[in-house]
Image (cartoon, rainbow, N blue to C red):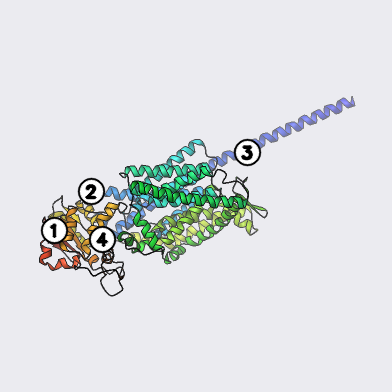
Amino acid sequence: MISIRQRKGIQTTEVSEDYVAQEENVKLENKLSSSCTNRRLWTILSFTVGGTVALCTGLLTSVYLATLHENDLWFSNIKKYIEPVYFYIYTLFGLQAIYVTALYITSWLLSGTWLSGLLAAFWYVTNRIDTTRVEFTIPLRENWALPFFAIQIAAITYFLRPNLQPLSQRLTLLAIFMSTFLFSLTWQFNQFMMLMQALVLFILDSLDMLPAVKVTWLYGIQLTGLLLVCILQFFNSMILGSLLISFNLSVLIARKLQKNLKTGSFLNRLGKLLLHLFVVLCLTLFLNNIIKKILNLKSDEHIFKFLKAKFGFGATRDFDANLYLCEEAFGLLPFNTFERLSDTLLFYAYIFVLSITVIAALAVAFRNLSDSTNQQSMYKMGEYRIGLKPETAYNLIHTILFGFLALSTMRMKYLWTSHMCVFASFGLCSPEIWELLLKLIHLYNPKRICIMRYSIPILILLYLCYKFWPGMMDELSELREFYDPDTVELMNWINSKTPRKAVFAGSMQLLAGVKLCTGRTLTNHPHYEDNSLRERTKAVYQIYAKRAPEEVHALLRSFGTDYVILEDSICYERRHRRGCRLRDLLDIANGHMMDGPGKNDPDLKLAGHPRFCEEIKRNLPPYTAYFTRVFQNKTFHVYKLSRNK
C-alpha cells in the first residue's frame, strides 16, 4: 500500500509538473506571438512613416529647386518658341524629386532606418552647389540621367541582399534593367560611368565578396541595356566600340576559362587573381580593337586623346580633345569643394564612415583570399568577428572609384557627392558600423549602439536646420531676373525678320538657344559623340579661324547655311588663357601660329589670311561678295550668305 501510494503520489506530482510546464509553454507562445505581432505592427508603422517622409522630402526638394530657378531667372517671363517647353521644365524638376527619393531609399536600405534617408536628403540640399546643377543649367543631359542612375543604385543595393524571394528578385532585376536602360539613353557619358560600375563588380567578385550569380546578372543587364540604346540611337557607333561591352564580354569569357579561381591557399589565389586580371585586360583591349577595326569606328577617339593628354602621356593638337582639356569642368576637383562639404559636416562624417568600412573590407578580403571555404564574408579579429554585407561592400567600392573619378574630373563630382550623402548618412545610422567601432575600443554595449545610431544623426539634423534654414528662406524670398538684352534682341530679330525655314550656323551654345526660342534649323548641335557632327562643328567654327572668305563660304554653304552668327565674346575671348581660347585651338589644329605674345611650336606657320571674324567687319569687297550684314548689336553680328559658288 505504501508503495502504491508513493507511486500515486509520484504520478500526481508528475502530472502537476507537466501541467505547469504546458501552462508556461502556452504563456511563452502567447508572449512570443504578441511580441511578433507588435514587431510586425512596428515594422508597418515605420515603413509607412519612412515612405511618407521619403515622398515628402523628394517633392519639397523639387519645389525648392524649381522655385530657386524661377526666382533667379524669372523663366516664366522669357519668350518659348513653343508652349510645351514647360512640360520639359516640370519633368526635369519632377525627376529631381525621384532622384532625392532614390538617394533616401538607398541610405534606408543600407542602414535599416529611414532616419539615415532623411539625413542624406538634408545633406543633398544643403550641399546643392556640389550635388546638382539643375537649378541654373536645366538643359544638361546629366539632369535627366542621374535620377535613373540613383534608382539603379538603390535597386542594386536591394538586389544584393541575401535570401530574396524569387518574385522580389525578378521585380528588382526589372527595376535595374529599366533604370540602366533609361540612364544609358539620356546621357552621353553612360558607357564610362557603367564601366566604373562594372569595375566595382569585378573587384568584389574577384575578392569573393559578392555572389557570382548575381554579378553575372548585372553584367548581362549592362550589356543588354547598352545594346538596346545603341539600336534606339540609330546604331550609335560610339556605343558599339565602347570599352564597357568589351570589358563585360572579357570578364565572362575569363571566368569560363578560369573555373577554379576561388580555390587554394592565399598565395595561390593571389597568383590566380593577378593572372585573371591580366587575362581580362588583354581580352578587353583585343576585343575593343577588333570591334573598332571591323566596324571602322572612330566616335570616341577624342575621348582617349583627351585622357592621354590630361594624364601627361603626350600633348595633342586634336581640336575636340583640346576643347575638353581647356574647360574648367574637366580639370581637377578644386580644394575649396572640401571646405564647403566640411561646412555641413558631410565630409567629416564621410571620412569617418569610409575609414571604418575600408578597414572591415580589407579584413574580409584577406579572410576570403586566405580561406577558400569561407562563404560569409566574415573575419575574426581577436575575439570579435568582422562582417561586411554584400550591399555595403558594393556601395563602398562604388564611392571609392567614383571619388577618384571626381578628383580627376570636376564635372563628374555630382556622381560622387550625391552618393557621399548616402554613404555618410548610412554609416552614422548603421548598427554594424557602431558595433565594430565600439568593439574595437572595448566599449561595446547594445544600448550604446542604439543611442549612437539615433542621437548623432538627430543632432546633425538639428545643426543643419539651425545653420542653413534661415539662409534657405532668404533665398526663396530673393527675386532676380534674367537680363541679357542683346540675346533677346537677336532672338526677336530672328523671329520677325527671317524665314521659318532659314538655316543658322554659329557656336553650339548659342544655337541651342536659337532652336529653343525660334525653332529655326541649325547646322550643328552639341551631340558631340558622333564623329560626323564633330567634324561639322569644327568646319562651322572656321568662322573664328584665319581662313579666306571664299573657303568659309564654301564650308557653310555645304551644310545649307543661310545665316551665320558671329559672337564678339568668342572672337575677342579673354576668359581662357592663351592656348585655350577657341581661336587658338583652331589655329593650332590648322597649323597656324597663335595671336599675341608667347611661344608657338616651331612647326606652326603664319596664316595666309587674317582672322575671318575680325576682317569681315571691315566690309571689304572679298567679304561682301559672299556675306551681307543683316543684324548687329554690341554682342552679335549676323550675316546672310550669298548664293554664289
N-terminal-most mark, 1 or 4: 4
Residue at numbered disc 4:
482
In the depicted structure, whether residue 232 falls above or below residue 555? above
Question: Could you tell me which quadrant the C terminus lies in?
Answer: bottom left
Is there a contact, CB below 8 Å, between mark 3 and mark 4? no
Left of 326 or right of it: where is 507?
Answer: left
Secondary structure state at the residue bearing disc 1: strand
Secondary structure state at the residue bearing disc 4: loop
Residue at numbered disc 3:
32
Q: Quadrant of residue 355?
A: bottom right
Residue depth check, mark 3 versus mark 4: number of the one nearer the observer: 4
Question: Could you tell me which quadrant the N terminus lies in?
Answer: top right
Secondary structure state at the residue bearing disc 2: loop
Q: Give, as a three-letter code, the residue at label 4.
A: Phe
Left of 23 or right of it: where is 146?
Answer: left
Left of 114 or right of it: where is 606?
Answer: left
N-terminal-most mark, 1 or 2: 2
N-terminal-most mark, 1 or 3: 3
Front residue (pair 607, 333): 607
Specify the farthest residue to the right. Answer: 2
Residue 83 badge: 2
Front residue (pair 387, 610): 610
Front residue (pair 325, 566): 325
Residue 640 badge: 1
Circle 2 packing at 10 Å, graded few (<14), some (14-19), many (20+), is few
Circle 1 packing at 10 Å, graded few (<14), some (14-19), many (20+), is some
